[in-house]
Amino acid sequence: MACALLPAKTTSAHWLAHRAFTDAVERFLEREDAGVASYIFLSHSWGMALQIGQKLSSLGPIFAF
């Protein structure tokens, strides 16, 4: 997987005029945070595994996948 395709955590700043909507967005983001962190970790782990596999494959047929 190309490094440019790996997910990265980003931040943004928005002002929401309606307090109830702001509260709802905050609750959603709190719940979403764990899922996003897991997705980023797994994506980066998979990307690293692919890179290791490519390096091993380049060593010869005994390491080919």
Image (cartoon, rainbow, N blue to C red):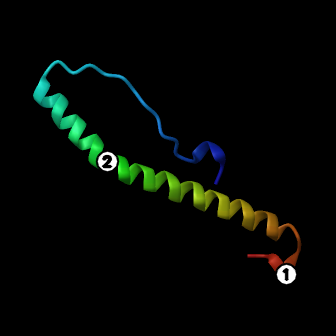
Residue 63 falls left or right of residue 35: right
Discs 2/1, front: 2
Q: Which residue is mark 1?
A: 62
Q: Amino acid at mark 2?
A: Glu
Residue drawn at x 13%, y 22% as measured from the top left: 18
Where does residue 50 sit, x and y in percent of width and height?
67, 63
Q: In front here: 33 or 5?
A: 33
Q: Which mark is residue 8?
A: none
The alpha-carbon separation of the residues under discs 2 and 1 comes to: 43 Å
Q: Residues within 10 Å of mark 2 (few under 14, many from 20)?
A: few
Residue 56 location in percent, x, y?
81, 69
Residue 4 or residue 14, whichever sits in front: 14
Report the residue marked by disc 2.
Answer: 32
First along the sequence among labels 2 and 1: 2
* Disc 2, SS: helix
Quadrant of the image occupied by residue 12 = top left
Q: Quadrant of the C terminus?
A: bottom right
Location of residue 52 with respect to 12 vertically, above or below = below
Q: Quadrant of residue 62?
A: bottom right
Where's residue 52, x and y in %?
A: 74, 64
* Quarter residue 15 falls in: top left
Which residue corresponds to the image point at 88% horizontal and 70% vertical from the top-left?
Answer: 59
Q: Is residue 28 left or right of residue 19?
A: right
